Image (cartoon, grey):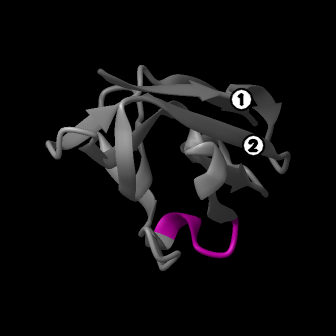
Amino acid sequence: QVRLVESGGGLVQAGGSLRLSCAASGIIFSLNAMGWYRQAPGKQRELVTVITGGGSTNYADSVKGRFTISRDNAKNTVYLQMNSLKPEDTGVYYCNARVITMDYRDLEVWGQGTLVTVSS
């Protein structure tokens, strides 16, 4: 079993900052791409940002220049630093990872989600 556990969500005023964390645990051989998605009320889940195993990153246009994704491979953890938050950033943020298990299965794993609320 592989689990992703997110933390760091909460309520913040517009212009503020939050830092999300997502830690992977279980029988992991390697973690490949890791990313963050979000789902606003009444909308579909969308990709926010992704980071490859080699550290290359990609961001949705709506968060470029404000959000930064990073990872600590020794801790099997990915982070999302969110600055200059806007009310439209409100939603449930989900961590996602491609995992190779110790028995060489290739899995896509999701976290349970953490709520970010940005007040105007």
Instruction: Report the amino acid beneath label 1.
Output: Gly
Name the image quarter holding residue 43: top left
Q: Secondary structure at mark 1?
A: loop
User: Which quarter of the rendered picture does the C terminus lie within?
Assistant: top right
Query: 10 Å neighbourhood of mark 1: few (<14), some, or many (≥20)?
Result: some
- Can residue 42 be spotted in the picture? yes
Query: Which residue is painted at 62% across and 30% down in the image?
Result: 116
Percent x, y for residue 17? 82, 46
Query: Which residue is painted at 42% across and 54% down in the image?
Result: 34
> Between disc 1 and disc 2, whose residue precedes?
1
Name the image quarter holding residue 65: bottom right
72 and 113: which is toward the camera: 72
Q: Which residue is mark 1?
A: 8
90 and 71: which is toward the camera: 71
Q: Please give left or right for residue 102 compared with residue 40 in the image.
A: left
Q: Do labels 1 and 2 touch, CB within 8 Å?
A: yes
Query: Which residue is painted at 31% across and 27% down in the image?
Result: 42
User: Which quarter of the rendered picture does the N terminus lie within?
Assistant: top left
Percent x, y for residue 107? 19, 41
Instruction: Report the amino acid beneath label 2.
Output: Arg
The image shows residue 79, relative to residue 67, as above or below, that is above
Q: Secondary structure at mark 2?
A: strand
Query: 10 Å neighbourhood of mark 2: few (<14), some, or many (≥20)?
Result: some
Q: What is the tally of numbered marks visible in this picture? A: 2
- The question of residue 22 being in magenta is answered with no
Q: Which residue is mark 2?
A: 19
The image shows residue 44, relative to residue 57, as above or below, that is above
Which span is picked out in magenta? 62-66
Percent x, y for residue 77? 59, 44
